[in-house]
Image (cartoon, grey):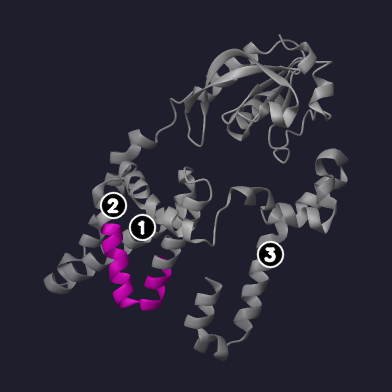
Amino acid sequence: VILFVLADARREIRARPGLLVKAATAFAVGLLPYLYLPLRALAGPAEIYGAFLTLEGLFAHISGAQFRGDMHFTSIESIQAAWAALPQVSDHVLALSNPAFVVLGFFGIALLVLSDRWFGWLLVLLGVVNVYFYANYLGDLSHYLLTSWLILGIGLAYAGETIVEMVVQRGGPRLSWVAYAMLILPVVLLASNWATHDQSANHDGEHFTADVFAALPQDAVLVTYWDALTPLSYKHCIEGVRPDVSLRAYDDKALVTCDPVQRPLTDVARRRPVFALLVNDETIEERTGLVRIPVENFTLPWGQRYPQLQRSLYRLVPPDQAP
């Protein structure tokens, strides 16, 4: 986007070079919230926040280095993955909106390409890049398509504006009221999609956390993953549910700050009951050095607002204690 602005607004920038200074300042101001991290790290504890006291650790967090293992870019296979994801993206957009939104959105983007070439093609490029990143990160996290939704919204607004202009030009000023009639469109979109997006009756998170905590004995340690860890840690750390339990992320970088468990888990398992609740559970024994024993089944979330995958809760024990 920066390169686009430098190219498209080159004459304005040459005439007013101070714009670059103002833009750079605005960009720097947008980064200021990251200063909270080293300030918070000064208060400790060091085992959780210590990395933010070094430039290397701070930049690793800001740049998202911990997520790079799931990113698959700059290869022929990544282009093929993005192309293969197009039907999935199309189905997602149609399922969460309606054909009028999609058709008018693409129509408006096409009009923008014809009337404002630079901006129109920028929107097309950003849409392509967004789908590419979505397909080659994890490929099933639909909230990573928010940029594409925004682009369709821009196209829809421009299509509506163009339609109003055409009606007024052909029918005269007496038809200018049509501009107000366009307000009906977002109302119709809201009403037609309300049931799909309304989550007010979704209490799956409350039920899930209650069931998991009920399955854990006193002083248990639970090793789990991001989707399950977030509601469990909220109940545990913020609301104080089951203060005797300790939560541990399977991914060492996804920390729960209220009760870190010392490593290694093989030592912890000799003092406290250790459990694991994971979607990808094939490598538990390899990564923990403990033997898994099935306890009971749970339906787990995976990138959605509802649980969908059947997995087992395991008790993890040292090899010499395995049955």
Residue at the limit of the structure toward the top, as seen here: 323
Q: 31 or 77, which lies in front?
A: 77
The disc at residue 29 is: 3
Please give the name of the residue rendered at 23% of the width and 55% of the height, measured from the top-left corner.
181
Q: Which residue is mark 2?
A: 101
Please give the name of the residue rendered at 66% of the width and 22% of the height, measured from the top-left corner.
276
Residues under numbered marks 1 and 2 in contact, where contact means CB atoms less than 8 Å apart: yes
Q: 191 or 223, which lies in front?
A: 223
Q: Quadrant of residue 171?
A: bottom left
Residues under numbered marks 1 and 3 in contact, where contact means CB atoms less than 8 Å apart: no
Quote the CA–CA distance across marks 1 and 3. 29 Å
Q: Nearer the viewer, mark 2 or mark 3?
A: 2
Residues under numbered marks 2 and 3 in contact, where contact means CB atoms less than 8 Å apart: no
Question: Is 239 on the left or on the right of 122, as rendered?
Answer: right
Question: Is 47 on the left or on the right of 230, as rendered?
Answer: right
Quote the CA–CA distance across marks 1 and 2. 8 Å
Q: Position of residue 108 (x, y in %)?
A: 29, 64
Q: Residues within 10 Å of mark 2 (few under 14, many from 20)?
A: some
Disc 2 marks a residue whose amino acid type is Phe
Q: Where does the magenta region start and end? A: 104-123
Tag 2, which secondary structure?
helix
Q: Position of residue 283 (x, y in %)?
A: 65, 31
Q: Which residue is mark 1?
A: 152
Q: Is 266 rendered above or below residue 323?
A: below
Q: Is 215 rendered above or below residue 157?
A: above
Q: Residues within 10 Å of mark 3 (few under 14, many from 20)?
A: few
Please give the name of the residue rendered at 63% of the width and 49% of the height, measured from the top-left corner.
69
Q: Residues within 10 Å of mark 1 (few under 14, many from 20)?
A: many
| Residue 183 seen | no
Tag 1, which secondary structure?
helix
